[in-house]
């Protein structure tokens, strides 16, 4: 893996309050951004313009597997019950190739669902698929039950090895 500690190399974004508190404390990030429903397109334009080598996204989840951070590996063309890209089948999936490594308290997962996490993942994965974005990408689902300091230590180990 490349050394991630050079400028414009690692951009991070968060989709919730918990992950925002984590985002701003991660030392290896060159740029932090909080993505909300009203600024998704602005963030996408920024990363297309900047072309960071790596993008790390984070969102929270409260489902099963609360003992592990989920490294998501699949996104699908669905937000709520509608297709995101109307010209593609709602069932279309894109396999993500996360640049982070699996460590203790993490697992690979393929159940992003059809909420905001999947919407942003789909849009970034489509930009990569179409060649508009040259970045490597990873999205982490953080259990709501995890302590912030624990998550920071785990994520920094995932990206610094």
Image (cartoon, rainbow, N blue to C red):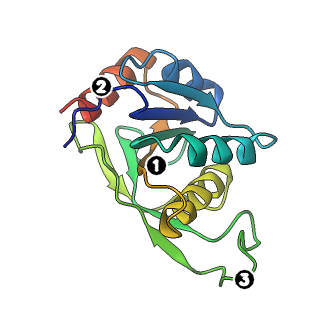
Residue 15 x/y as whole percent: 63, 37
Residue 70 x/y as whole percent: 39, 46
Query: Helix, strand or loop at disc 3?
Result: loop
Query: Helix, strand or loop at disc 2?
Result: loop
- Of callouts 3 and 1, the N-terminal one: 1
Foreground label between 2 and 1: 2
Placement of 88 over or under 69, stated as above or below: below
Placement of 52 over or under 124, stated as above or below: above
- Of callouts 2 and 1, the N-terminal one: 2
Q: Is residue 55 left or right of residue 89?
A: left
Disc 3 and disc 1 in contact, CB within 8 angstroms = no
The residue tagged 2 is: 5
- Which class describes the residues within 10 Å of circle 3: few (<14), some (14-19), or many (20+)? few
Give the farthest residue toward the front: 49
Disc 2 and disc 1 in contact, CB within 8 angstroms = no
Rendered residue at 41%/61% (across/down): 96
| Numbered circle sitting on residue 87 | 3
The residue tagged 1 is: 64
């Amino acid at each position: 893996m490349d050394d991630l500690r050079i400028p414009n190399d690692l951009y991070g974004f968060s989709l919730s309050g918990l992950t925002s508190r984590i985002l701003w404390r991660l030392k290896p990030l060159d740029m932090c951004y909080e993505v909300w429903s009203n600024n998704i397109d602005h963030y996408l334009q920024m990363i297309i313009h900047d072309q960071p080598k790596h993008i790390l996204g984070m969102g929270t989840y409260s489902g099963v597997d609360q003992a592990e951070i989920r490294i998501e590996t699949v996104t699908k063309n669905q937000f709520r019950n509608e297709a995101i890209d109307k010209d593609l089948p709602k069932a279309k999936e894109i396999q993500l190739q996360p640049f982070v490594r699996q460590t203790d308290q993490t697992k690979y997962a393929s159940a992003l669902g059809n909420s905001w996490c999947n919407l942003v993942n789909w849009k970034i994965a489509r930009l990569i698929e179409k060649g508009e974005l040259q970045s490597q990408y990873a999205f982490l689902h953080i259990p709501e039950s995890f302590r912030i300091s624990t998550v920071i230590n785990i994520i920094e180990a995932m990206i610094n090895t």
